[in-house]
Image (tube, rainbow, N blue to C red):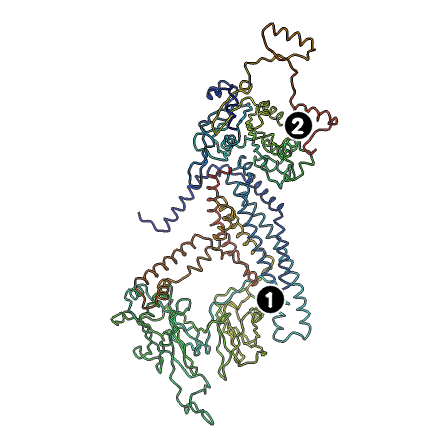
């Protein structure tokens, strides 16, 4: 009988659960919630009478002091910083209290022999453990309720004061024009928000808006010369990857036939400047268009050393439609080819194209790039084109360098128009309203100034509009005033987003300014709920995390001393994250480490040993992570901080992690305690 | 301590099985121990101490049974084994008809440990309520039983509202005893019950043990204070270095068979002289003295005589 690995693990898991149930059947049948609740009551009362709750006023005092020391950029930032301090204090207090109490309780009762009077009563070890967990869970719920109430009162007070101040300011002439829309937005909606938002799917940066956005196969999309680039995705079949890896001397040839054109009004030609009336036809010929090719992995990380990139350059043919044999060619040497093959296992690789002359706009479509793979005898063993999905070419990415908060969108250069960032929203859930009702799009970008060109006192200006793909309606272009660390808002009529398929078009208007734009920095407000409700959900998630800490602390304390138990709990809960940090590497990590340590001329045997060792370590950490809880499931504080709504799915995910790890730990603790001689 | 066995040359080690035979004593067996052995081991599982060695005995319903022995003789180990706090290395035991370690039998057992190992942050009343809940006593039952028990062990209204960490040693023993009796147990295990009690408390404890016996309860008493054991126990066993040295009825074990005592009301000097002459004629070399009371009886008499009529002596005084 052949069993699938999944079936086998389910079978083994089922058998294990059955064995556990049989082992604990006697105690399960005798289970009494009354006794368990009595134990939980005494645990709760003990903690309260040992003045554990005093830690909450101390935490509150720390928060209040911290709030006095903060230097917020604006009102929203003041609320954000205070909220962060409150949430941090709440999390810290509840986790530390849970950890210390849970890991010290049993060892202390055993050493003080209080356990004698417990286990000589008709109390099962299961009831004892569960009672203690429930008792500590009650305590952590109380701690969180106190901290939550404090957080709410503090923030409500702040919100009331700040919004009042803003309303007063708005009635005067004080606020600069650039801030007025955002201040009005705050005055209307308050600073404490819990919003469901949509952040858009994809941000493309075009030199000019594409004529036909739907045609991804043949219509060229133009991008500016570096730092802008186009990334063409391409899948390498597994057999081909294996063949390249086995061969060792394979080479990849990238064939290019990109459309290109002169930038409108571009007069910055080399040589003598033309005099009089400029006729483009009379101008001296521009230098030929060159592009550089860089290979990137699925995460758009370069997989080729910078020195190699210098060599990967080619002059483009005069026309895009030339046959492939006449296309420009870039040859990747065997080393580069090996790296590309390694990375291709993780997903599609991207052929990134950088224009090298700023006089041109470089275009790209689904038929601009071809990849040929040659074996060691220089026979072409495969010819690949961009992947085809659902009858269309896979989307080509038009990007630029990554700034602090996203892709850098520069302002106009001389008299050349600025590039346009297009953030696509597709199938966005919207709540139906009147066509002219205003919809809020919150934005938060980073302003990065280009060196020495501009006066820093100048405002950075952007222009934004929303184009509805369903109706063809485009909202009026609105001038925005982004500032680093500050939110601002674009308000457009509902009909601009009706149907859920629309593009947000962004352009930096200030010459020499660069604004970092990312999809995450643009939030279309879809729904709003009370802030208190959102905070309560976040505290619930925190409580679920404390349950896991309690169970882990109590479990470890059944067989080791409390300091060791507390340490093991911390390692157990953070282990996955640590292992991920160490083990989060690509499949080619071993090969890269070997190259790094021993160089390209190093001993082949030693390199292989390093590769195998590093790969084994990576695999080990991957296995470790599978058995440790994923603490990121509890990461909802950031959502509350950003005013984002916590979905029940977040709470469910946290509950699932707690259940999946707390139950087995409880089983382990029960087995250990049932077989433990509690008399020291 | 090592001389304990040699200090009792007159006592013989009887055949344990014969003495413990259920047919020879009234009541059904409550505790049955067969070849019970406990060897403590070190971290590596190597034998370290043989704390109890091949103990076999039976305790019957309604008996007050004394476990005697110097420190480290195996008394506490025996109790811990019977209560399931530790597990035997060899041998077996049954308590109230069930194998040891079954939590179900605990519902019929009351245990007063050597020291009152209780939650020090609870007050007397809360302590009893908590332990009562572990026996699934309802609120109504607790409302009835808790004040009765607190009265019975002599903890007044003031004392029962105080936290246990503020209790004197005697008060802690009293509340410890009360928690041991909260479930109206059939078998009561008392480990050094009179430790920390003043003579009045000691007497009350002994009276209570005898009253429990009258109610048909079985009591296992573990004590260093031999006088206490002698006063209340029906049978005792003496353990030394983990082994049972003797087992039998207290009255038989302590009887000095080569001496005869004749008791009479207080005699005048003339009566004593005549009696001495009479005994000389019988060729009996006798000593005529007044019997002595115990210091405990003297103390109790003085305290009771000096306590105002109607005012009870309680632990908080």
Q: Position of residue A306 (x, y in %)?
A: 39, 73
* Residue that extends furthest to the bottom in the rendered view of this protein: A276
With respect to residue B274, does A64 lie above or below? below
From this view, report whether residue B172 is shown above or below residue A183: above
Task: Give the crowd class for mark 2: few <14, some 14-19, many >=20 residues within 10 Å.
Answer: some
- Mark nearest the camera among 1 and 2 is 2
CA separation in Å, label 1 and label 2:
72 Å
Residue A680 visible in the displayed image: yes
- Residue A337: give x, y in percent of width and height: 33, 69
Whole-percent x and y of residue A423? 49, 71
Q: Secondary structure at mark 2?
A: helix
Badge count = 2
Classify mark 1: residues with Cα within 10 Å, few (<14), some (14-19) or many (20+): some
Q: Is residue B195 above or below residue A369?
A: above
Give the residue at mark 1.
Answer: A77
User: Mark 1 falls on what kind of element?
Assistant: helix
Indicate the chain on which mark 1 is placed: A
Q: Position of residue B20 (x, y in %)?
A: 49, 21
Q: Chain of mark 2?
A: B
Where, by quadrant of the figure, is residue A252 drawn? bottom left
Which residue is at the front of the view, A246 or B192? B192
The residue singled out by tag 2 in the image is B200
Residue B292 occupies which quadrant of the picture? top right
């Amino acid at each position: 009988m052949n069993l699938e690995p999944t079936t086998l693990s389910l079978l083994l898991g089922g058998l294990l659960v059955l064995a556990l149930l049989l082992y604990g059947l006697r105690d399960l049948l005798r289970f009494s919630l009354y006794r368990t609740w009595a134990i939980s009551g005494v645990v709760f009362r003990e903690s309260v009478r040992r003045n554990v709750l005093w830690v909450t006023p101390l935490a509150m005092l720390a928060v209040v002091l911290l709030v006095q020391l903060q230097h917020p950029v604006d009102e929203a930032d003041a609320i954000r910083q205070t909220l962060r301090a409150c949430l941090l204090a709440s999390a810290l207090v509840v986790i530390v209290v849970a950890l210390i109490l849970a890991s010290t309780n049993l060892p202390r009762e055993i050493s003080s022999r209080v356990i004698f009077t417990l286990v000589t009563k008709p109390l099962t070890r299961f009831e004892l453990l569960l009672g203690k967990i429930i008792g500590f869970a009650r305590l952590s719920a109380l701690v969180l309720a106190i901290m939550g109430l404090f957080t709410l009162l503090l923030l409500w007070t702040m919100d009331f004061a700040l919004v009042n101040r803003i309303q007063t300011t708005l009635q005067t002439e004080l606020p600069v024009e650039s801030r007025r829309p955002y201040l009005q937005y705050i005055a209307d909606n308050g600073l404490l928000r819990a919003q469901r938002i949509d952040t858009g799917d994809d941000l493309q940066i075009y030199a000019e808006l594409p004529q036909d956005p739907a045609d991804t196969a043949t219509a060229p999309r133009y991008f500016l010369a570096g730092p802008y680039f186009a990334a063409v995705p391409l899948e390498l079949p597994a057999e081909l990857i294996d063949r390249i890896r086995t061969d060792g001397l394979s080479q990849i040839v990238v064939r290019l036939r990109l459309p290109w054109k002169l930038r409108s009004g571009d007069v910055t030609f080399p040589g003598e400047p033309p005099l009089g009336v400029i006729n483009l036809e009379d101008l001296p010929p521009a230098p030929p268009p060159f592009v550089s090719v860089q290979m990137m992995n699925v995460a758009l990380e370069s997989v080729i050393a910078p020195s190699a990139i210098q060599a990967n350059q080619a002059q483009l043919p005069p026309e895009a439609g030339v046959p492939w044999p006449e296309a420009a060619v870039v040859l990747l040497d065997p080393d580069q080819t090996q790296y590309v093959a390694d990375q291709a296992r993780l997903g599609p690789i991207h052929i990134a194209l950088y224009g090298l002359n700023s006089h041109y706009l470089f275009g790209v479509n689904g038929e601009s790039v071809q990849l040929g793979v040659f074996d060691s005898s220089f026979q072409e063993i495969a010819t690949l084109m961009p992947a085809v999905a659902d009858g269309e070419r896979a989307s080509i990415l038009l990007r630029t360098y990554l700034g602090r908060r996203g892709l850098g969108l520069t302002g106009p250069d001389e008299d050349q128009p600025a590039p346009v960032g297009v953030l696509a929203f597709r199938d966005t859930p919207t709540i139906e309203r009147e066509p002219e009702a205003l919809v809020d799009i919150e934005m938060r970008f980073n302003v990065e100034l280009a060196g020495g060109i501009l006066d820093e006192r100048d405002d950075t200006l952007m222009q934004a509009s929303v184009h509805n793909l369903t109706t063809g309606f485009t909202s009026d272009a609105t001038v925005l005033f982004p500032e680093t660390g500050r939110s601002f808002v674009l308000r457009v009529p509902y009909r601009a987003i009706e149907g859920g398929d629309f593009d947000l078009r962004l352009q930096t208007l200030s010459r020499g300014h660069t604004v970092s734009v990312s999809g995450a920095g643009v939030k279309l407000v879809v729904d709003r709920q009370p802030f208190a409700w959102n905070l309560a959900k976040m505290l619930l998630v925190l409580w679920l995390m404390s349950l896991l800490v309690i169970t882990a602390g109590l479990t470890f304390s059944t067989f080791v001393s409390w300091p060791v138990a507390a340490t093991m709990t911390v390692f157990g809960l953070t282990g996955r994250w640590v292992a991920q940090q160490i083990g989060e590497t690509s499949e080619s990590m071993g090969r890269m480490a070997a190259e790094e340590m021993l160089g390209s001329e190093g001993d082949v045997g030693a390199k292989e040993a390093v590769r195998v060792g590093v790969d084994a370590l990576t695999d080990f950490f991957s296995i470790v992570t599978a058995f440790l809880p994923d603490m990121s499931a509890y990461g909802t504080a950031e959502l509350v901080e950003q005013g984002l709504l916590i979905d029940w799915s977040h709470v469910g995910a946290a509950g699932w992690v707690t259940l999946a790890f707390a139950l087995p730990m409880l089983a382990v603790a029960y087995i250990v305690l049932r077989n433990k001689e509690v008399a020291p | 301590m090592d001389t304990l066995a040699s200090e009792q040359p007159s006592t013989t080690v009887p055949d344990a099985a014969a003495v413990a035979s259920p047919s020879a004593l009234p009541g059904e067996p409550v505790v049955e121990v067969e070849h019970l052995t406990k060897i403590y081991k070190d971290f590596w599982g190597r034998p370290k101490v043989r704390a109890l060695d091949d103990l076999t005995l039976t305790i019957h319903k309604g008996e007050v049974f004394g476990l005697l022995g110097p420190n480290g003789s195996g008394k506490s180990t025996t109790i811990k084994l019977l209560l399931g706090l530790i597990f035997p290395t060899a041998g077996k035991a049954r308590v109230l008809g069930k194998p040891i370690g079954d939590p179900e039998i605990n519902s019929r057992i009351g245990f007063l440990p050597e020291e009152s190992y209780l939650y020090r942050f609870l007050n007397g009343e809360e302590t009893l309520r908590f332990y009562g809940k572990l026996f699934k006593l309802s609120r109504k039952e607790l409302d009835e039983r808790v004040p009765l028990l607190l009265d019975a062990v002599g903890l007044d209204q003031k004392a029962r509202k105080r936290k246990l960490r503020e209790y004197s040693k005697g008060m802690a023993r009293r509340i410890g005893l009360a928690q041991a009796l909260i479930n109206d147990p059939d078998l009561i295990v008392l480990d050094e019950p009179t430790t920390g009690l003043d003579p009045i408390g000691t007497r009350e404890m002994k009276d209570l043990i005898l009253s429990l016996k009258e109610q048909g309860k079985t009591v296992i008493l573990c004590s260093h204070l031999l006088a206490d054991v002698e006063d209340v126990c029906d049978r005792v066993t003496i353990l030394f270095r983990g082994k049972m040295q003797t087992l039998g009825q207290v009255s038989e074990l302590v009887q000095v068979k080569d001496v005869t005592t004749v008791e009479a009301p207080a005699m005048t000097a003339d009566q004593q002289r005549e009696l001495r002459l009479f005994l000389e004629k019988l060729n009996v070399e006798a000593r005529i003295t007044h019997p002595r009371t115990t210091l405990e009886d003297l103390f109790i008499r003085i305290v009771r005589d000096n306590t105002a009529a109607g005012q009870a002596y309680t632990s908080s005084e």
